[in-house]
Amino acid sequence: MKDKSNQSHSAEAETEALVNKNVSRRSFLKGAGLTTAGTVMVSSGVMAFDRPKPQAKKAIGPGATTINLRVNGKTRTIAVEPRTTLATALREHLQLTGTKIVCDRGSCSACTVWLDDQPVNSCLMLAVEVGDSEITTVEGLSKNGQLHPVQEAFIEHDATQCGFCTPGMVMTTAHLLRNNPDPSLEDVRHAVRGNLCRCGTHPNVFKATMAAAKKS
Amino acid sequence: MNRFSWFDATSIKEAFEQVTATVSEHIQPKGPKDAAVFKTGGVDLLDLVKEGLANPSRIVNIRNIPGLDEKSFDKKSGLRLGANVTLAEMAEDPVIRENYLALHLAVNHAATPQLRNMSTLGGNLAQRTRCWYFRSLDHECFRKGTGTCFAQDGENEFHAIMRNEDCASVHASSVATALMAFNATVEITNSKGEQKTVTMEEFFIHPSDDSRYECILKSDELITAVIVPPVSSGTKSAYIKQGARESYDWAIADVAVVAEMSGSTCKKVEIVLGAAAPIPFKSMEAIGQLKGKTINDTTAGNAARAAMEKATPLTKNGYKVDVFNAIIKRAILQLV
Ligand SMILES: Cc1cc2nc3c(=O)[nH]c(=O)nc-3n(C[C@H](O)[C@H](O)[C@H](O)COP(=O)(O)OP(=O)(O)OC[C@H]3O[C@@H](n4cnc5c(N)ncnc54)[C@H](O)[C@@H]3O)c2cc1C
Ligand code: FES
Ligand code: FES
C-alpha cells in the first residue's frame, strides 16, 4: 500500500485512460505482460473506488473459472468455482498451507491473511472476489530468507504451542507493527482480540510482539 | 457449501436485475429454493451457506457498486453512512468518535478487527440472528417461519429476557443498539429507484409480528444508507457491551444511552438495550424514569430497575437481568 503512493502520474493517467476506454485492468495487466507485483504500475489507488476489484468477467460459475490471484508478490492463475473460499484456494490450489482453517466461520482468525493492507478472514472470503487486490500470507512475510521480526520474536519468546493459531497471530501482530511501530500493550491486546488460542499462548504473544516492536 | 454462480454488480440497477429473493425469503421452509441473493461482506451469508441453511443458486455481489461506500458529515444534517461502509471504517472515523461516542464504542466492540474489515453496515443490519436453534439445520424453529421456539425451555442462557413470549432469539447487531439510541434512520432504495427512510424501530420486525423476517427488506429493496441525525453540543452518550469473554464475543447484554444534558440534569434521553429482546429494544420505562432528573447513583439505579421491571427471563438466563441492571446504571453514570 505504502509503496503505491509514489507511482508516476503518467502511469495513473495511462491507466485511467484505459479504464475510461472500457479496457479492463485485468486485460491491461495481461497485455502489458506484468506478472509480478514489483513491476505492476497500477494500483487500487488509481481506480474510482478502492474496493477489491471485480475480475474481468461479471457472471461466472457455478463451474470452475480461471482467475488470477496476486499472492505474496506473484500472480498465480488457478481454476476455482465461485464457492471456493480464499483459504481453500490458498491451501489446496496454491499449496500455501501456512494459512490455517480452524473454525471456518470467522470466529478464530486462524485464517488471517492481508487483503491489500487489511487483515481479513480468508475462510469467509471467496477467491473470486479478491480481484486485483494483493494477498499476503504468512509465507510472504519473510524477505530474502530472513524471517519477519515478529516471527523471530515468536520463536524467541515461545509464543507458539500446538501452532494452529500461530500463522493468524503472526499476520495480525505483523500488521499491527506495520501501522503502529511502537504499540502499547493495550494496542497489542486489541489487535489480537479476534485471534483465538486454545493453548493459552496469549501472554507470550504479547511479549513477542512488544519485543519485535523494540527491535524493528 | 452448495454450488452457486457469481455475479459482480457494478450498479444498483444491475444488482436488482439479478436478485430474486432476500436471504430471509429464501431460507423459509416454503421460500423459493432457487434464489439469487445479495452479498456484501459475506460474513453472515457465507455462514448461512456453509451451515446449509441457505442454498442460493446465485450470489449477487453488491460490494463493488460505486458510491455505496461513501460517508459524509455535516453539523446541520448529521452523519450519512453508505450501506457498504465497513465497520472498520466506522471504528476508525474521528467524526464518529467525537460526535457519536456510543456508536464509536459499539462498532469498536463488534466482532473482531478482521471481521470489521469485511463487514458492512448494511449487511450488519440485515444479518440474521445467532440463536443456535435458528442456525441449526436440525431445528425447524419459529424464527424460520414455522415450528416452535426450542429456546423457551432449552439451552437459553444467551437468549432474550424481554418480549420473548413466542421466540427468544436476540438480534445479532450490537451496532444497531447505538444507532437506535441516536434515532438513526435507514434509507431504502427499491428497484424503481424510489427511496424511503424508516426509523430503526420501523426497520426491525419482532417475531410475534412476523416470525419469518427480522427486518422489513423485500427482494426489490436495498439499504443504501444509514442516516444519524445531528447531535446538540450538550449531547453525551455511553455504550457498554458485556460479553462472555473480554477479548471479543457476541453481546450477552449491551446498552447505549444518548442524552441531552444541562449540567448533570438529563433533559432528553434515549436508552436502548441489545441482546435483551428479539429486536433492539428501546426501554420507554427507563427513559421515563430518567428524563428530567439529575443523574446520580439513585436515579441511575432506578432507571436500570425500571428497564428490567417487565423482564421475563427463561430457565437459564436470569443472570442477564442482573447484568443489564449493572451495565444500564453504569452507562448512565458515565454521562456525568
Ligand atoms: C464471529 C462473529 C462475531 C460477530 N460479532 C458481532 C458483534 O459483536 N456485533 C455485531 O453487530 N455484529 C457482529 N458480527 C456480524 C458481522 O460483523 C457482520 O456485520 C455480519 O455478519 C454481516 O455483515 P456483511 O457485510 O458481511 O453482510 P453479508 O453477509 O454480505 O450480508 C448479510 C445479509 O444482509 C443482506 N444485505 C447485505 N447488504 C445489504 C444491503 N445494502 N441492503 C439489503 N440487504 C443487504 C444480504 O443479502 C444478507 O442477507 C459478528 C460476526 C461473526 C462471524
Ligand atoms: S478459520 Fe477463519 S476465522 Fe476461524
Ligand atoms: S498455540 Fe495452540 S491454539 Fe494457539
Image (tube, coloured by chain):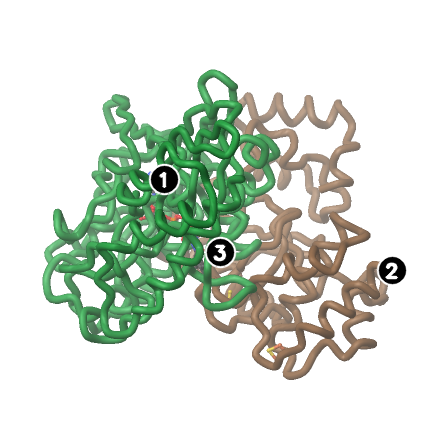
Q: Residues within 10 Å of mark 2 (few under 14, many from 20)?
A: few
Q: What colour denotes chain A?
A: brown
At x 33%, y 32%, the residue is B186
CA gap between label 2 and label 1 equals: 50 Å
A56 shown above or below A187: above
Q: Are marks 3 and 2 on the same chain?
A: no
Disc 3 target residue: B111
Is B312 in front, or is A137?
B312
Residue B3 appears at what percent x and percent y? Answer: 32, 60
The letter of the green chain is B
Q: Is mark 2 within 8 Å of ligand 3?
A: no
User: Circle 3 marks a residue in which chain?
Assistant: B
Q: Is mark 3 within 8 Å of ligand 1?
A: yes
Earlier sequence position, callout 1 versus callout 3: 3
In which quadrant will I find the N terminus of chain A? top right
Q: How many marks?
A: 3
**Amino acid type, mark 2:** Lys
**Left or right, A154 with reference to B76:** right
Residue B237 appears at what percent x and percent y? Answer: 49, 38
Is B160 in front, or is B232?
B232
Q: Residues within 10 Å of mark 1 (few under 14, many from 20)?
A: many
Disc 1 target residue: B290
User: Circle 2 marks a residue in which chain?
Assistant: A
**Amino acid type, mark 1:** Leu
Element on which disc 3 rests = loop
**Left or right, A160 with reference to B336:** right
Element on which disc 1 rests = helix
Q: Is mark 1 within 8 Å of ligand 1?
A: no
Q: Quadrant of residue A143?
A: bottom right
